[in-house]
Amino acid sequence: MSTIIFILELIASLLGVVYIILIARKNALGWLAGIISCALFAGLCIESDLISQGIIQVLNVLMGIWGWIQWQKQVIPVKSYPKLGIIFLAVIPVIYVGSILCFPGLSWTTQLDQIALICSLFATVLTVRMIQQNWLLWLVVNGITAITACSNELYFYAGLSFIYFVVSLYGMYQWKK
């Protein structure tokens, strides 16, 4: 791993931690930290041939801009739809099996990467709309991302994903208040 990649991954990871803590606290400044973090990770993922993760990061930059704009307009109350959590937990294994059936030649990490992409998009929309069940999806996304990043030797990214997983539990708690 080159020194520049190491430094960029470290900076992106630190900004990512700032992002998720601020979002868990419902602070709009988190979106700005997230935008920079995701832009850095987009480049790192694409450079490491994690194309789906790179796409996720580019989309997260765009979604971050949308989130920043939405959270600036008004105070959005947290909403909860408990049945969404049950639906997510039922659909995720179906998506994985569907991915295996539709794309049997792809590696297991690529299969998981595709699931992370789909779940990340839904989770970001739920986060922008302040729907509490976003945290459940983020737990899935962060768990998958930790596994795929580690298998591709992006250890800071894997560590960040693990930290995101833990902080997502904190976010679940904060958004229930």
Image (cartoon, grey):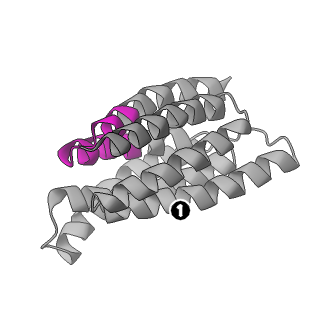
Q: Which residue is mark 1?
A: 59
Taking 46 as reference, is 71 left or right? right
Mark 1 residue type: Leu
Instruction: Classify residue 54 by image quadrant.
Output: bottom left
The residue drawn where x is 45% and y is 33% is: 164
Query: Of all residues shown, which one is farthest toward the bottom?
Result: 102
Compare residues 104 and 95 and report the one nearer the observer: 104
Residue 173 drawn at (x, y percent): 57, 23
How many marks do you count on the picture?
Answer: 1
Residue 63 drawn at (x, y percent): 62, 58
Above or below 109: residue 132? above
Compare residues 113 and 160 and report the one nearer the observer: 160
Above or below 165: residue 91? below
Q: Quadrant of the C terminus?
A: top right
Taking 69 as reference, is 140 left or right? left
Q: Quadrant of the N terminus?
A: top left
Mark 1 residue crowding within 10 angstroms, few (<14) / some (14–19) / many (20+): many
Membership of 85 in magenta stretch? no
The residue drawn where x is 34% and y is 39% is: 6
Taking 125 as reference, is 142 left or right? left
- The kind of secondary structure the magenta stretch mainly shows is helix
Magenta segment: 140-160
In what element is the residue under mark 1? Answer: helix
Instruction: Classify residue 47 by image quadrant.
Output: bottom left
> Is residue 118 in view?
no
> Is residue 145 in view?
yes
Query: Of all residues shown, which one is farthest toward the front?
Result: 3
The residue drawn where x is 57% and y is 52% is: 124
Compare residues 12 and 111 and report the one nearer the observer: 12
Residue 70 drawn at (x, y percent): 78, 52
